[in-house]
Amino acid sequence: PNILPPLLPALQEGLGHADQWVREASILALGAIADGCKEDLAPHLLQLHPFLLQQLNSPESLPQLRCIAAWTLARYASWTVDQMENANEGGGGDPSLVGQVAEALVNRMLDPHKKVQIAICSALGVFVEATGELMSPFLEPVYRVLMQALQKYGTRSRLVLFDTLGVMAEYVGSEIGRDPLPGMYVPPLLRLWNDIAMENPFDRSLLPLMECLGSSSVVCGLNYQPWALESFEMAMSTIEACTIIIAHEDDLQDIDEDMTDPIICAVDLIDGLAEGLGPNFAGLVNGSARFGQTFPNVLQSVAEHFVSGVRMSAFALLGDLARLAPSLIEAGLPQLLSEAISSIDPMHPAMCNNAVWAVGEVCVRCGEHSGPLTPHASNLVASLIPLLMGNAVDMDGNEISLPGIAENAATTMGRLASVNASFVAPELGRFLLGWCDGMSKISNPVERRDAFQGFVMAVRANPQSIQTTGSDMDEVITSILFAVVSWHIPESEIPSNLLSGEYRFEPFPSEFNELLASLRQLLHDLKTAAGEMWNQIEGQMPTNVRRLMQEVYGLS
C-alpha cells in the first residue's frame, strides 16, 4: 500500500516546524521513504529540494540537522539526475540541480563538527555514484575543497574522505585525470601517506588511502605518470616494511589477516599502476633505482605468501603483468606458475579465481610457444577439472559452489589448449560436459572466444573424447550444441520464450568469423559422427535452435 497520502500532511507540518528537532525527524522520514516513494513525491520535490539545500547551508541549523539534510539530499540523487536528463531532452527539468547539490555539499565540507564532516563526505560519495560523469564540470572546486579538508580532518573523517575519493575515481572515470586535477589531489595524498607510514606502516588509515590512489591511477592512465614512480616506491616500501616486521613475530600463527592488509593494498596499488600505465609500467619498474632489481623477488614472495589474501592480490597483479608487462615476469615464470597452480584451491574462492585467471593470461602471452607451460600443464589440467565438473569439495567432503569459477576455468582451459591442444586432449572425456557448461556461462566475448577456440582444437586432437564422457553420445552433442547457442543469446533482456517464441537470437560476432568457421566444421563433423542419431537430436531441438543451426551453421 502507498504510505505517502496519510504521511504527507504530517510530513509537511513537520518540515515547516519551528523546532529544529522536529524538522530533523521529518527530514529523516523524508529520506527514509526515498526508495519506495520517489515517483509519488516527484511533484513535491521541486519545492522540497531547495528546502533541503537551505537546511544544509543555514548557519542556524543544528549539526544534526545538517547531517540529516545531507543524507536526504543524497537519497534523492537519482531524482536530481532525472531532472538534468529531462532538461537535456527538452522535458522541462532543471539542469542546474546537480551543480547546486555539489556546491552545497562542498560548502559544508569544512564544517567544524566531525559528525557533519563524515555525513557530508558520505553524502558526496553517494551523490557521485548516482551522477557519475555529470560531476565533470564541478571537479576542480570539489577537489580543491577536498584537499583543504584533508589537512583539517581528524582520522575518522579522513577515512570517509578517502572512500569518497575512491568513489569519484570509480564513477566519474577518466575525467578525474584531466589537467590540472591529478596535480591537485595526488601530491597531498602521497605526502600524507609518507607521513603516516613513517610513524606506523600498519596504520589502518593507510588502507583506504592506498585504495583511492590505486583507483585514481587506473582511470588517470598516463596522466598519472608524474607521480607513478613515487607511488610505486611507496607501495614497495610498505610491502618491505610490513614483511620485515611480520617476519620478526615469534609465532606466525599469531599473525592475523589484518596485519597483512597493508601488503594487500600496496600490491593492489602496484596493479593499478600497471593497468593505468600499460606497457610503460615495465620502464617505470626498471627505472626505479631502489626497487627495479628486487621487484621480481617481491612478486615471488607475495605469490607464495602464507596468507591467502596476499596471494589473491599477487595473482591479480601476475595476470595483469602477463598482459601488459611480460618482461617483468619472464625470469621467475616457472616458480610463479607453480605457485599459481598450487593456489587453485576452492577453499579460498577469491584467491582460486584470481589464480585461474592469471594462469590463463600467461597462456595467452605464451601464444604458440608452449615451452614455459609444458612442465606445468598436467598439474593445471588436474586442478581445473574439479572446477569444471562442479565436484570441488571442502575438507569435510561437502561440495563447494564458487560463483564465476566454472566460466573462469573454462576460459583458462581453452587458453591452455590454444597453446598446445595435446596438453588438454588426452583427458578431455573426463571434463568435456563441464567445459561446455562453463563456456555457456562466459559473458566476456574475448574470453568466450578463447574458450571455444581451445575447445575446438582439443576435440580435433581427440575426437574419440565425445564417446568417453560416461554419457550417451546424443547428450554430449546436445551439450556442445547448447554451448554454441550461448553465442546468440541477447545480452540485454532474455525473453522467456527465446527457444520457441519469436526468433530473437543474435548473429555471431563478425570479428570472430574464423572461430565461426571452426564451429561450423565441428558441428558438421559431429553430425557425421552421429549418423542416424542426428535425426533424433535434431527432432528434440526447440524450434528456434533448429532454425539457428540451419541458418548460421548450415545444419539442414
Image: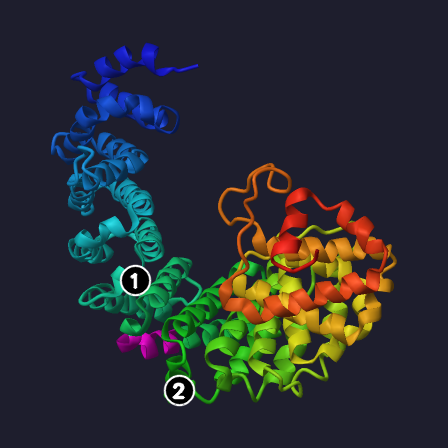
State whether residue 366 appears in this view: yes
Q: Residue 138: x, y in percent?
A: 18, 52
Describe residue 421's horizontal placement relative to residue 117 as left or right.
right
For the residue pair 531 and 233, the one nearer the viewer reads as: 531
Q: Which mark is residue 290?
A: 2
Q: Quadrant of the N terminus?
A: top left
Query: CA separation, marks 2 and 1?
Result: 30 Å
Label 2 neighbourhood size at 10 Å, few (<14), some (14-19), many (20+)?
Answer: few
Circle 1 SS class? helix
Tell me where residue 146 sits by quadrant: bottom left
| Front residue of 133 and 420 | 420
- The reply to whether discs 2 and 1 touch (Cβ–Cβ < 8 Å) is no
Q: Which mark is residue 174?
A: 1
The three-letter amino acid code for the residue at tag 2 is Arg
User: 362 and 187: which one is in front?
Assistant: 362
* Camera-side mark, 2 or 1: 1
Give the vertical position of 148 relative to 455 (above or below).
above
Q: Is residue 409 magenta?
A: no
- At label 1, the amino acid type is Ser
Pointer 2 or 1: first along the chain: 1
Q: Which residues are magenta?
A: 225-234
Q: Secondary structure at mark 2?
A: loop
Could you tell me which quadrant the C terminus lies in? bottom right
Q: Is residue 184 left or right of residue 202?
A: left
Q: Is residue 520 left or right of residue 39?
A: right
Q: Where does residue 447 sit, x and y in percent of width and height?
A: 56, 65
The residue most toward the left is 59
Residue at the image point whose x is 69% and y is 69% from the top: 456
